[in-house]
Image (cartoon, rainbow, N blue to C red):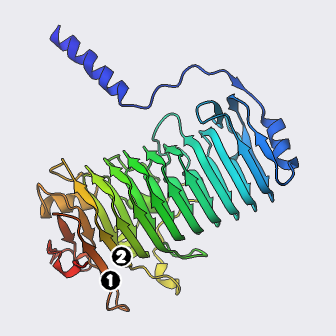
Amino acid sequence: MKTTYFIWISAVLVFSCSEPAPESRTWKSIERDLQTQLIATEDSSVIDLPEGNFMFTRTLSMDGKKNVTIRGKGMDKTILSWKNQTEGAEGLRVSNGVNIVLEDFSIEDAKGDNLKVSDTDGIVMRRIRSVWADGPKTENGAYALYPVLCKNVLMEECIAMGSSDAGIYVGQSDSVIIRNNKAYWNVAGIESENSKWVEIYGNEAYDNTGGILVFDLPGLTKYGHTTRVYKNIIRSNNHENFAQKGNIVASIPPGSGMMILATNTIEIFDNEFINNRSAGISVVSYELVAAMNEGEQEQENAIGGVQTVDNRYREDANYNPYPYNVSIHSNRFQNKHWFPTMKSDIGKLLLMKSPFSPPDIIYDGIEDPDRKERNICIGDNGKITFINLDAANDFKSLSKDVRAFTCN
C-alpha cells in the first residue's frame, strides 16, 4: 500500500511540474484567407486574428508593410499551429517593414523558426506565446521569436519554450528592449547576438541549458556592443543541451546561468542567479569555444538561421574574439547544488578544481595579445566563488582569487 501511494504521489508531482497537457482542440483552416490578407493589407491597418485553433501547412509571409498591427484575442485564445507544415521553414515571416506590431496570439510547431522578422525598423512582439508543444527536442526549430537585422525592437510579456537554439533571440540588430518575458525548456532562454544598444530586464529564464546569452560571433555583417542586463531572475538552468552538433549553442554547458562570449561594453547588475549548477556567469572568449568544438561537424538537415562554430574566425579582420569592458556588480547568487553537472567537459573540470562549491562567476583567463587592459570589473556581489580558468595554459594555474578583478 505504501509503495502504491508513493508512486501515485510521484506521478502527481511530475505532472504538476510539467507543461500542462493540451486540451482536445478543434482545428480550423484560415490559411488562404489570412495569407491573402497579409499580402493585400494597406499601410496603417489592423489585421484581427479570430479566436480559435488554426492549422497551417506553409509559411505565412508579410513583406514591405508600414504601420500594420496583427492582433489576436489572447495567447491562450488565438493559436496558430504549423504541426502539419509541408512547405517553408518559418511559421510567420515578416520582412522589410516599418512599425509593425504583433500581439496577443500563440505560434506553435513550425518546422524551422516560429516567428521571424527581418530588415524591419520598428517591431513590437507583445504577449506572444511561441512554443514547440511536445517539449524540448533536437528536431525542434531553432528560434521561437527571431528578429534579425532590425532596428527599434521591443519584445515584452512573451513566452518561449522548446527552441533547439534560442527561445527569445535578437541578432544583428540596433536599439533593442527585451523585458518581462518568460523563457524555459530552450537550449538558450534569451540571447542577444551581434546586437548593440540592448536592454534585457525584468525577465525570467529557467530550466534552459543556459539562461541568458550575450554573444558576438565572427563572419556576420554587424558586431555588437553596449548591453545592459538587470533585474532578471535566472534560475535552475540545468536542462541537458539538445542543440544540433556544431551549432554555437551546443557549446553551452548545462547549468549555465548567463554566458558572455566575445562581446564588449556590457553591464550586468541587480539580477538573481539561483541554482544554476555549473556557473552563475561565465565570461569567455571565442578561442575557448572554438577549441572546445574543434572537429565537431554540424548535423545535416539543420533548419533555421543557426550559427555554427567557425574555426576560421581569425580571418575576420573586424572581429575581436575577446570580451572586454565587462562590469558585473550588485547581483545576488545562491546555489543549493554541491556539484556541477557532469554532462560537459567544463562541469567535469569544475568538479575536480572546485568540489562542493560550483562557481558563481567564471573567467576563462585567455588574454588578448592586442589589448593590455581588458577592464573586466567584478564588485559588490556579496560573498561569491570566482574562478579564473587559465584556459590558455591548459588550466594549469587556475585561480580563485578575484582581487585582480575587484573594483567599484
Quadrant of image for the N terminus: top left
Q: Is residue 351 left or right of residue 137?
A: left
Q: Which residue occupies 38% across, 71% down?
A: 267
Toward the viewer: 274 or 317? 274
**329 displayed left or right of 241:** left
Q: Residues within 10 Å of mark 2 (few under 14, many from 20)?
A: many
Q: Which residue is mark 1?
A: 375
Q: Residue 187 in the image: state x and y as whole percent.
A: 43, 51
Would you call the spot at circle 1 few (<14 residues within 10 Å), some (14-19), or many (20 or more)? some
Q: Is residue 113 visible?
A: no
Element type at marker 2? Answer: strand
The C terminus lies in quadrant: bottom left
Q: Position of residue 312 (x, y in %)?
A: 48, 78
Q: Three-letter amino acid code at disc 1?
A: Asn
Question: x, y (%) of residue 165?
Answer: 49, 53
Q: The residue under label 2 is which amino acid type?
A: Val
Q: Is residue 78 above or below residue 98?
A: above
> Residue under circle 2?
326
Label 1: element kind: loop
C-alpha separation, residue under disc 1 versus residue under disc 2: 6 Å
Tell me: 344 left or right of 106: left
Q: Check if mark 1's residue and mark 2's residue have beta carbons within 8 Å.
A: yes
Q: Quadrant of residue 272?
A: bottom left
